[in-house]
Each structure stands twice: as structure tokens, then as C-alpha cells.
Image (tube, rainbow, N blue to C red):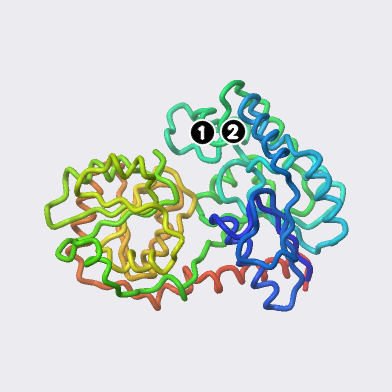
Amino acid sequence: MRVLQINSVCGFGSTGKIMVDIHNLLIENGHESLMFYGRNKASGVDEKYAKRFNSKLDILYHTFLTRFFDKHGFGSKRSTRKMIKEIEKFNPDIIHIHNIHGYYLNIELLFNYFKKSKRKIVWTFHDCWPFTGHCAYFDYPSEGTHWENGMHTCHTKKSYPKSSLFDREKKNMNDKKRIFSNVDDLTIVTPSNWLKDLVNQSYLKQYNALTIRNGIDLNVYKPIRSDIKEILNIKDKRIILGVASGWEERKGLHFFLELSKLISKEEIIILVGVTTKQISDLPNNIIGIQRTNSMKELAELYTAADVFVNPTLEDNYPTTNLEAQACGTKVVTFKTGGSPEGIFNSNGIVTSEKNSHELYEAIKTIFNDKDQVNVQMLAENIDKYILFKKYIDLYKRIINI
């Protein structure tokens, strides 16, 4: 079996790591695999398996089209044509696309090729961008958003992919619907049932959609005892942990700031992924740690925590919930997007009300809970080696082998 994957990045970020994980499984099982990507350098993979097609100048021009004219996905014509020629050379049995936004790809050229070539396509949605007129998410804030002719309107052109001048939402909606419709053999995969339900409400319901959840490496994320409490001089305190790749508004930073006014002196908040500016603005009972590239250090923090709190206001299927449970720590999250779907075997609490008081009540309930997380029972739900094998099985079903 010959499989080609396409994504904005390769080997880093959640989508880039997922692509490489699937690639590694393909190679280990004796299949041919190649990855095309658009930005930065590939990480954690032999370069013979990963090809980048965009120049920095091409990405800058695509960014210009997005920022000023709200034409995200309609630049990068030259690099997309170059990529299509390489697709023809490789002649894959399956083309698996991930994020096709990210300032690197021309969606019209690519999908016109799909329609003419009759390729078998798998498309993993990591967000809502394919069925909105602009944004990747629309849950927060949700005022004024609605379905319109199978597409969802967006709350602001200022969200990613940001446009500072023109608002082309209606034109983008019509163009995406025209471009993404009527592909002969396309299967959509979503990591959460929440996102699959949205796909089935959109014009994309014409396609078969199924859920394959994202997983994590249980060889990395597991209970690891450490002296982290002694190092941070918080040996006698209960740890409330929050982790994000970036603490923007939708990730819920303000809820931790509000929590800091509610927690007792025996409790401390640790936030991982904050910037130096954000650290300087934190109150004394919040310890800020900049983003760590050490997964072992992160696993130590998860293990040391007494509860993991994820107050995200919009998300598909955050793997931080999985990482915390794998390290033996229970989770508190809002009833938002696919976040609740990542809590297994009563290993956490989902709060319906999105406020700091509800969060703190749930946190105190976790503190008083004597039941331990059974990490072994989690494997079938969170182990990436088990979950991503479902992609291999899907490929085989599609090409009837």
C-alpha cells in the first residue's frame, strides 16, 4: 500500500506529530509512505520521507493575501502545482490530507486535481475551518453565529486566519462549498464525535464521516515520580495544573486568574506554556512555566499535580486531558467541544457552567476523591499505537485489500 499525507507542518505541533505517527506505523507494517508539508523544517523523521514545497516568499505572499484580502487558501499556486506533479510521480493508493490551511496550499488547485484524478482521499479534520467562511473555531464567542446553507458563520475576522482589512466571509463560504463538494471518493475523519456531528450538520454530510480519536505515547506519558515539588518549594501544597501550547483567550487563562482569588493557602496553581509577559503579570499563587520541549518534564508535572484543569472555551479533542490521566491525574474541564470526550472511566468532572466558581467546586471534589486513576484501563482509549492503527485499517477498507 502506498500512502501520501499532506499537512501544514511535519513532526511538530499536534497535527505534524500525528502525521509522523501514522507514517511510522505505515513503514513498520511494510507499506510505502511519503509526507508533503508546507512550512518550517520537518522534525523527528528521515528527510527522504518528507518533502516541503513552499518558499518563505510564497508563504509571505499567502499571508499578505490573508491579512489584507481574507483569501486564505487561495495563494500558493506555484507550490501547489509543483506538489501535484510530485503526487503524480509517487502515484499513491491513498492521499490523506490533514490541515490544508496554514498559508501554504491552494485549495482550489488541489481539489480540482482530486476531482479529475479520481484519487481516494482521507481527510482528517483537526478543526472547523473546512465548513466556515473564515475561522477555525466558532464556539467562543458564539453570539450571532449560525448555520447558513450548510456553512457556519464566524464571530470575527480577527481570529485565525486573521484578516485586518477585507471581510470575505460570504465569498469564502460559497467558494469552499463549491471546491470541497462532489469529490468522488472522500472519507472524512474527526477526532471527536462533537466535530463529526458538526460535519453531519454541514454541506459535507454528503461524505462518509467517522471518528478516530487522537492518542498519546504511553511510553512517555506515564506516572513519573520526581522532586518537582521540592524544586519549586511547594512541598506541602496541592497543585492545580494547567497546560497549553499558548494561553490565548479561548484557552481560558482568565479562569485561572479568577481561581487564584478563590483557592486556599494550601493550594497552588502551575501554568505551563505562558509567555514571559504573562508570567510577569501572574499573582503570587500562580507559578508560570514557559513552554517545555521535555515530555519527561511534562509527565513529571502531570504526575505531581493533584488535579489537571482545562478551562478551554473551544476545542476539538485536547490531548492534554489524555496526558494528565495517563500520568494518574484526574481532569476538570468545561462542557466545550470535544473536551469532555477525552475523560474516561470517571477520571474527571465536566462542568456545564463556564465560570471559576464551578471549576473550584469540581476541583475540591477531585481533592476529596479517594479513587485512583487506573492507567492500564485507559490504553485502548488513549494509546496512539492502538488508535492510529485504525487509519491503516481504514486505508485497507477503502482500497479493498
Local crowd size for mark 2, using a 10 Å CA cut-off: few (<14), some (14–19), many (≥20): many
First-in-chain label (2 vs 1): 2
In the rendered structure, the answer to whether residue 336 lies left or right of residue 154 reads left
Q: Position of residue 167 (x, y in %)?
A: 60, 23
Q: Secondary structure at mark 1?
A: loop
Q: Which residue reaches farthest left? A: 265
Local crowd size for mark 1, using a 10 Å CA cut-off: few (<14), some (14–19), many (≥20): some
Q: Position of residue 125 (x, y in %)?
A: 60, 51
Distance from disc 2 to disc 1, alpha carbons, whole Å, reads: 8 Å
Asked which quadrant contains residue 260, the reply is: top left
Residue that badge 2 annotates: 134
Q: Position of residue 377 (x, y in %)?
A: 40, 76
Residue flagged by tag 1: what amino acid is it?
Answer: Ser
Q: Position of residue 197 (x, y in %)?
A: 54, 48
Mark linked to residue 203: none
Residue situated in front as seen by the camera: 119 or 302: 302
Residue that badge 1 annotates: 159
**Residue pictured at 20% horizontal, 47% vertical:** 284
**Residue pictured at 74% horizontal, 67% vertical:** 33
Figure quadrant of the N terminus: bottom right
Q: Secondary structure at mark 2?
A: loop
Q: Which of labels 2 and 1 is toward the front?
A: 1
Q: Which residue reaches farthest top? A: 165
Residue flagged by tag 2: what amino acid is it?
Answer: His
**Residue pictured at 71% horizontal, 66% vertical:** 395
Q: Tell whether label 1 touches label 2 (CB within 8 Å).
A: yes
In the rendered structure, the answer to whether residue 22 lies left or right of residue 335 reads right
